Amino acid sequence: MLNHLRPAFTLVVVLTVLTGLVYPLTINGIAQAVMQTKANGSLIERDGAVVGSMLIGQNFTADRYFWPRPSATGPGPYNAAASSGSNLGTTSAKLRDRVAADVARLKVTGMTSPMPADAVTTSGSGLDPHISPAFAEAQVPRIALARGLEPAVVASLVKQQIEHPAFGIIGEARVNVLQLNLALDALKM
């Protein structure tokens, strides 16, 4: 019986060391050497302090900032420990009520129809850091008024921050809300 258990035990130990230690450490070492920023979470720093990640949205609510799309994470918005979509379908009364409330809230701020879809819909993960250029442009008047800036200045900043599709065809044009808000704060007034 020991003759059968020894090779099995040895195989478990060897595979555990290979797949649990050697492989992850090798891949991490390669990632650190080749793409350190991405391997460490694509963190954004300002004045030596980490202010966020390019990969996880933040819940900006002040009128002087661009707002992200709604988040379905719980218990609060943009909770990276609870990434999930809402799983509410088009026939859900709860979804219709939430979207209607979001549309009404945005109209009060001066946003007009047609409302960009990402202004009132959540992403699959609930953590999307991007909004569409249309949603960013729709927020320009509110932000210009709140900051006492010319709308053309804010609109120009939005155009500068647009990330275009990879190779011109993969993905959609988008704007990272955190980077846009940091660029907005950096404007000399």
Image: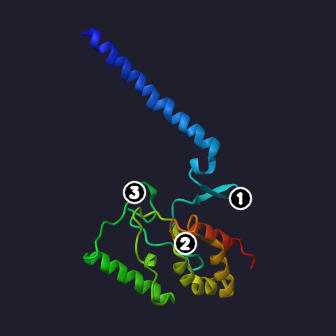
Please name the amino acid that badge 1 sits on.
Answer: Asp
User: Is residue 27 among what the camera can see?
Assistant: yes
Residue farthest along the right direction in this orientation:
188
Q: Secondary structure at mark 3?
A: helix
Q: Secondary structure at mark 2?
A: loop
Residue in the picture at 35% in, 78% down: 98
Above or below 166: residue 162: below
For label 3, the crowd category at 10 Å Cα-Cα, with few meaning under 14, some 14 to 19 and many 20 or more, is some
| Picture disc at residue 93 | none
Q: Can you identify the residue that label 3 sits on? A: 82
Q: Can you identify the residue that label 1 sits on? A: 47
Q: Secondary structure at mark 1?
A: loop
156 lies left or right of 80: right
Tags 3 and 1 touching, CB below 8 Å: no
Residue 27: image quadrant is top right
Count how many numbered circles sit on residues in the image: 3
Please name the amino acid that badge 3 sits on.
Answer: Ala
Q: Nearer the viewer, mark 2 or mark 1?
A: 2
Please name the amino acid that badge 2 sits on.
Answer: Ala
x, y percentage for residue 154? 65, 81
Q: Can you identify the residue that label 2 sits on? A: 173
From mark 3 to mark 2, how far is it between C-alphas?
27 Å
Tags 2 and 1 touching, CB below 8 Å: no
x, y percentage for residue 12? 36, 23
- Residue placed most toward the observer, 150 or 23: 23
Mark closest to the chain's N terminus, 2 or 1: 1
Mark closest to the chain's N terminus, 3 or 1: 1
